[in-house]
Amino acid sequence: MSQGTSPGQPGWKWFPDVQQNWKLDVVTLLAVIGESSISEHSQTITASLLCLLPRIIPAPQALLKPSRPNRMPETLAKMTGVYSGTTLDSVGFFATIITPLEGLNPFSFTVLEIKHTQHTFGDIEVPSPQSRSRHNSLFSRSVSWARSLSGKTVIEEPKNNRLRRAPSPDEESGFPLHSANHAKSKTLRQDQDNGEFVPKQLRRRATAKQMMQDVLATSTLANTQKAPAVPAKLFSPIHILSVFSTFLSIALIVCAIIWEDGAAIIAITLISLTASITGYASSWRPILMNRKHTNEVPDGDVMIRTREGAFILIKCTEEVARELYSGTEECQYKVGGRTYRALMAIGTIILMISVVLFGNCTWNSQVFIGGSYIVLNGLYWGLGMLPRSYFWDLSRYEWRDVTPDDAKQADKTTDKDNQREGYPSFTRTLWFAIRETKRTSWVNRSGAAPGTEQWKRWLAEAEDAAKTGNRSWPSVERKDIIMKENVDRAAQHAPATEVQSAAVNQINNWNQDSSF
């Protein structure tokens, strides 16, 4: 190498050869890069009390919004109650975690069975029929008479009385029945109107892990008897990354103290407090909709149809359907609107001061701070590749795939020799859905088929075949034969505007909330 062309010599021009010649003023830009990744996880971050931890986060201005959303984001799809007839144009946030719609193949068909993990009537525990018959025994009536003056009666039950089947409602009293394996005793209170003893509604006992998740979701334990809440998972990636960011902020302050860098100490402290202020202002928890009465209602089965022609049949009770599908997930915030705007203003001022101080830190502090933001940005981007089921605790429900064997390959070619029934098509998948529900009223309600006379005739034949158990009914062949009787071919196509486009839904969301 010739003279003057190596580092440290006067002729070296490729890179700065002295540490002080490196300019790190761009570290202030690194602190505000990554807004899209933080915005994607903003609701998950603020749904836990760990959002109050003082820490550095990439692009904290992503949490500085003028308003807060009132509902969780939804996915566009046509959803209809098989028995209730309720029709909606979108599927709820938590429902899409259980039934992801993005990865469904065109013309696929799936049947899922969803139920609560515990034998409860929504959020009210119910007694077993065996315990009810025990109340009518001579001994129980004697104890009730002896303690009637006190206004309540306590009846002890055997310890080994376990419920072996799903509970059923009490036909006489109309009260939900309690599962006997949740408590060894139960309390009866006297009705002021007719003097009869009715069971007191008992609260479901939560595990230690569930209690911890509830504490992280809200400052007090969630009252599931009023409105069930879905907490963030205790060991979710967001929680782990929040704790990691807190320790990283502490390490930055300790190093700044060792390097005697006062600007870095103040800057890191202020920007960490910004995360706590904005986190508290946006702190919330998702509240599901539950039933308020115990009257009899139709079954809660739901049919979901995507724009690509995929069908999902959800077999569930009305309580599950109300919580996940037909109901809305509301955002319950801890602070009011005026307090929120005041905290946003304070957070904005502190953020601007800390960014100015970042540009006046020493060289070592700027290197450490810049590297920290680069690592955190990469980690938050990595969170976007994880399924949403990693972040939310849906242990309240259990689900399983119960798709019949002759319908699992609805999106694939099953018989190459049969050009009609052996190849995937919308008509064949629609027949599979009718065959499982044995109804066609939901088809008309959801607009899955045109309302012409020919299609009405085809639907009538499909319903008759489903009710008679003819699972090999030639749906595509019958459709072709019936449609040849009509000259107007345009009337036979399924409507293309049944599911709203993304642009229309975006405009509606903007008009409703004035933000995303």
Image (cartoon, helix red, strand yellow):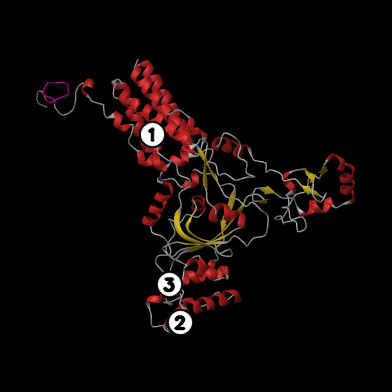
- Residue in the picture at 74% in, 43% down: 183
**Mark 2 crowdedness (10 Å alpha carbons): few <14, some 14-19, many ≥20:** some
- Residue in the picture at 54% in, 56% down: 326
Q: Position of residue 512 (x, y in %)?
A: 43, 50
Give SS at disc 3. Answer: loop
Magenta span has 302? no
* Residue 406 visible here: no
Residue range of the region highlighted in magenta in the rendering: 5-12
Query: In the drawing, what numbered circle is on residue 482?
Result: 2
Q: Tag 2 or tag 1, which sits nearer the N-term? A: 1
Give SS at disc 2. Answer: helix
- Among the 4 quarters of the image, the one containing residue 469: bottom right
Q: Nearer the viewer, residue 242 or 453?
A: 453
* Residue 214 visible here: yes
Give SS at disc 1. Answer: helix
In the rendered view, would you say 474 is above or below 51?
below
Query: In the drawing, what numbered circle is on residue 60?
Result: 1
Query: In the drawing, what numbered circle is on residue 423?
Result: 3
Check disc 3 and give the amino acid type.
Answer: Tyr
**Mark 3 crowdedness (10 Å alpha carbons): few <14, some 14-19, many ≥20:** some
Q: Position of residue 46 (x, y in %)?
A: 47, 37
Dots 3, 1 in contact, CB < 8 A: no
Dots 3, 2 in contact, CB < 8 A: no
Q: Tag 2 or tag 3, which sits nearer the N-term? A: 3
Mark 3 and mark 2: Cα distance apart in space:
19 Å
Check disc 1 and give the amino acid type.
Answer: Pro
- Residue in the picture at 23% in, 21% down: 19
Mark 3 and mark 1: Cα distance apart in space:
52 Å
Q: Position of residue 268 (x, y in %)?
A: 38, 24
Discs 3/2, front: 2
Q: Tag 1 or tag 3, which sits nearer the N-term? A: 1
Discs 3/1, front: 1
